[in-house]
Image: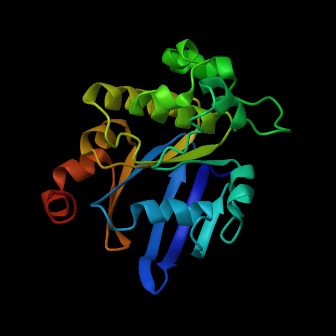
Amino acid sequence: MTDMMLEVNDLHAYYGKSHILQGVNLNVKNGEIVSILGRNGVGRSTTLKAIMGDVPPQGSIKFKGKEIAGLKSYQVAYCGLGYVPEDRSIFPSLTVEQNLILGEKSGRKNPRWSIDDVYNLFPILRERKDTDASVLSGGEQQMLTVCRTLMGDPDLIMVDEPTEGLSPQMTERVGNLLKSIAERKISILLVEQKLTIAMRISHRVYVMGHGHIVFEGTPADLEKNDAVRREWLEV
C-alpha cells in the first residue's frame, strides 16, 4: 500500500478565459504537512478549489489512489478529503457545538474525532460551546472551522490561509493545532502567506508562481535558496 495520500498531475483550471493553473504537479504523503507558498494571485487558493471540485479541474487528481478529478465537492468530501476555505464559512447564528455537530458525517464507523477530542485540542471552544459562533474572535472562528472539518473524520485536510488577519499569538496557536492534527496521521495541504509559520510546521513546501510550481523542497532547502525567495516570495 502506498503512503501517498494526494497526487496532482498536470492540473489546469480556468476562470472564464483566464488560464489560472497551468500544469500544477504536487503530492502529499500520509501524515505530512505540505505548504503551498507564493504571492497573492498566483493560483494557490485555486489549486485547493480545483482539488475539491469547486473549480472545474483538468488533469489528474488522485486521492488514496482513486481518481477524483471531475467529482462534485460533496463526493470529494465523502472520499475523506476535508476543506477549510479562506472565508471560514461558520454558521454565525448557531452555537459553537451546533457548528461542530454539522461537521459530522453520518455512517462513519469509529471516527477519529469526537466533540470531546476537539474540545481537548482547543479548550476555549468547550468554554464557548453554548455561545453563538458570531461572537467568537476571528482566531476562534478559524479554530472552529478547522475543528468542524475534523468532525467529518478526513484523511487529509486542505486549509486556505488559516492565519490571515490573526494576532501573532493566535497564529502560533493555529500552527500548534495543525501540528497536533498531523500527529494523528492526518495529512495537511496548507496555503499560507506567513512564511515563518509554514516553514516551522511543514515537512515540505511548494512555491507557486504564475499558475505553476517553481520550487519544491524542505523548508531548509528553501531557506538556502535566496534566488527563489527573492523572485517568488519577497514583496
**Can you say whether 31 is above or below 170 in the image?**
below
**Can you say whether 2 is above or below 149 in the image?**
below
61 vs 26, left or right, is right
Residue positioned most to the top: 127
99 vs 29, left or right, is right
Where in the figure is residue 233, as x and y percent of width and height?
21, 58
In the picture, which quadrant includes the C terminus? Answer: bottom left
Residue positioned most to the right: 107
Please tell me which residue lies in front, 114 or 63: 114
Please tell me which residue lies in front, 202 or 107: 107
The picture quadrant where one finds residue 133 is top right
115 vs 14, left or right, is right
Instruction: Give the color scheme: rainbow, by chain, secondary structure or one colour.
Output: rainbow
Residue lying at 54% horizontally and 17% vertically, measured from the top left: 128
Where in the figure is residue 46, as x and y percent of width and height?
46, 65
**Can you say whether 24 is above or below 138 in the image?**
below
The answer, for residue 183, to whether it is visible in the render is no
The picture quadrant where one finds residue 111 is top right
- Labels in figure, total: 0
Residue positioned most to the bottom: 17
Please tell me which residue lies in front, 215 or 46: 46
The answer, for residue 82, to whether it is visible in the render is yes
Residue lying at 16% horizontally and 57% vertically, measured from the top left: 234
Residue lying at 29% horizontally and 42% vertically, measured from the top left: 199
Where in the figure is residue 219, as x and y percent of width and height?
29, 46
Residue lying at 42% horizontally and 83% vertically, measured from the top left: 18
**Can you say whether 88 is above or below 48 in the image?**
above
Where in the figure is residue 147, as x and y percent of width and height?
57, 32
